[in-house]
Amino acid sequence: MATKNLRSPAQSLKRSVTALTATRDPLLVKIKPWTEEYCLTRNQQCLAPRLSRSMATETQLPQTEVYNPFSSTILRRPPPPVPNVLATVYSFPHMEPLRFTEYPANQLHLPLRRDILQRAVIYEADAHRGMSTANTKWRSEVHGSGRKIRPQKGTGKARLGDKKSPMLRGGGVAFGPKPRDMSTKLPRKIYDLAWRTALSYRYRRGELIVVQKIGDIEMEDSRWMDQIMTWNHWGKRDGRSLIVTRRVMPKLFEALNGGKEQPGCGRHGIVKEEADIDVKDILELGRVVIEKRSLDAMLREHSSDLNMRVPSAVRR
């Protein structure tokens, strides 16, 4: 005879949960289930620290701090060292290699920035224009009487003022052009960066030739300078060349640029003084032949954006 199951579904579920919990947690075996002591002990086990290792391992962060509010000094990380680039120094005009010289990469190995070069060339072109010469007379500057030409009404014609009116022949010009400065502005740091970018562009392409010293030639004959430019592959067939000197040398300038007595050999290139060089001249011809002291002076003059420090950022 089958016995009747007198347990309700709720009681069966309660006993199964109690048995499962007691088997997993040995501390709860001797405690009456679902009492206040039972629930408190179980919550403490849930909040206890786990001894197992998680998937994300915690690592200790580096202790190098940049700013400590409890100290009187600011800890600064030293800037990374700037690598140097090598340039060969030649003798002029024989072009024999003499030695190597080093230049910082932030002066002679910058990446090409066409936008900065364009701004520098436009700035120099506007500065070379100088003052505009256009000059016109406005209505207030025209000589003549200020009397009204005809009455305001009654003639059946349009209203008209004095004879200096811009609508009449011989009258003034309505807001015509005046002499003004055509130069524009460019920040000094951007212009210096454009200078070094142009020199770096020539250096990376192998078109910046550094010579020890460019001395004046013995005679101002253009044929001798023509042979030098052709022999060194600096002439017209190779894109012409720009020679930069520290000072003006009369015979060399006359032989290359020409003078009163001879036309010169300007088809092969031009020679300029260091003070007359700009960014456009560096980028215009096929290569740049420059004295070492002139190159050093250019880099020293156009490095205002490199060694800039903020004194207020250091507290003692």
Image (cartoon, grey):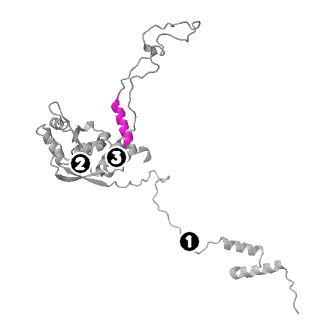
Residue 218 percent location from the top left of the image:
11, 39
Number of residues whose C-alpha sits closer than 10 Å to that of mark 1, classed few (under 14), some (14–19) or many (20 or more): few
Magenta stretch encompasses residue 12:
no
Number of residues whose C-alpha sits closer than 10 Å to that of mark 2, classed few (under 14), some (14–19) or many (20 or more): some
Residue 226 percent location from the top left of the image:
16, 42
Residue 143 percent location from the top left of the image:
42, 10
Residue underneath mark 3: 197
Labels 1 and 2 touching (C-beta < 8 A): no
User: Disc 1 marks which amino acid?
Assistant: Met
Q: Look at the numbered disc 1 and give the secondary structure of its residue.
A: loop
Characterize the magenta stretch by its predominant secondary structure.
helix
Q: Look at the numbered disc 2 and give the secondary structure of its residue.
A: strand
Q: Residue furthest bottom?
A: 1
Q: How many marks?
A: 3
Nearer to us: label 1 or label 3: 3
Nearer to us: label 1 or label 2: 2
Along the line of sight, the residue nearer the viewer: 106 or 214: 214
Along the line of sight, the residue nearer the viewer: 135 or 180: 135
**Vertical arrangement, residue 277 with respect to residue 53, above or below:** above
Along the line of sight, the residue nearer the viewer: 221 or 122: 221
User: Disc 2 marks which amino acid?
Assistant: Ile
Among the two numbered marks 1 and 3 on one chain, the one whose residue lies closer to the N terminus: 1
Q: Is residue 249 left or right of residue 37?
A: left
Residue underneath mark 1: 55
The residue that appears at 38% across and 41% down in the rendered structure is 118
The magenta span reads: 117-130
**Vertical arrangement, residue 10 with respect to residue 59, above or below:** below
Residue 291 visible in the snapshot: no
Q: Look at the numbered disc 3 and give the secondary structure of its residue.
A: helix
Residue underneath mark 2: 209
Along the line of sight, the residue nearer the viewer: 237 or 8: 237
